[in-house]
Amino acid sequence: MTGGTLPKVVSACCGLSGFAVAVIAGLAADNAGDVILFRALASMVACQVVGLVVGMIIERVVVESVESYKQSMPVGPSHPAELSTPAPPNTGAAAS
């Protein structure tokens, strides 16, 4: 994912989950329709904000973890002597 996509996805999922839970809870409690929708919308906004913060934290942790791994495990040889090609093994099968 590109930068900023993860917080948006987590935010949307949290907001929609909060909306669904609020609607189901309101229907189970036999509340009026307008009360259910108002509370569901308020819950959706609150959960979306919380999801955005959580998504930003997750993205930062993942990026820092990847950067730490890249620094601890560099790609390619770390010493110039490792760049030279090794001599072929002496098997004794060469013709004289």
Image (tube, helix red, strand yellow):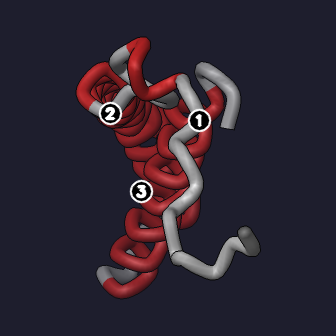
Q: CA distance from mark 1 to mark 2?
A: 22 Å
Q: What amino acid does circle 1 point to? A: Thr
Viewer-side label of 1, 2: 1
Circle 2 Cα neighbour tier, 10 Å, few/some/many (<14 / 14–19 / ≥20)? few
At which x and y percent is residue 36? 47, 60
Residue type at numbered disc 3: Gly
Look at the numbered discs 3 and 1 and tell me whether their residues touch, using CB distance below 8 Å: no
Q: Position of residue 73 (x, y in %)?
A: 32, 33
User: In the structure shown, which secondary structural element does the residue marked by tag 1 occupy?
Assistant: loop
Q: Where residue 73 is drawn, which disc sits there?
A: 2
Mark 1 and mark 2 residues within 8 Å of each other at the beta carbon: no
* Amino acid on which the number 2 mark rests in the picture: Met
Looking at this view, name the residue that lies furthest to the top.
80
> What is the count of numbered marks?
3
Residue found at the very far front of the displayed protein: 96
In space, the residues marked 3 and 1 are separated at their CA atoms by 61 Å
Residue at which label 1 appears: 85
**Residue where numbered disc 3 is placed:** 18
Screen quadrant of the N terminus: top right
Residue at the image point whose x is 52% and y is 76% from the top: 91
Position of residue 26 in the picture relative to residue 95 (left or right): left
Tell me the quarter of the image containing the C terminus.
bottom right
Residue at 54 percent of width and 54 percent of height: 13
| Alpha carbon distance from label 3 to label 2 | 41 Å
Name the residue at 42% across, 13% down: 80
Residue, x 58% and y 55% (percent of image)?
Answer: 88
Residue nearest the observer in this picture, 58 or 25: 58
Q: Position of residue 40 (x, y in %)?
A: 47, 52
Vertically, is 75 above or below 1?
Answer: above
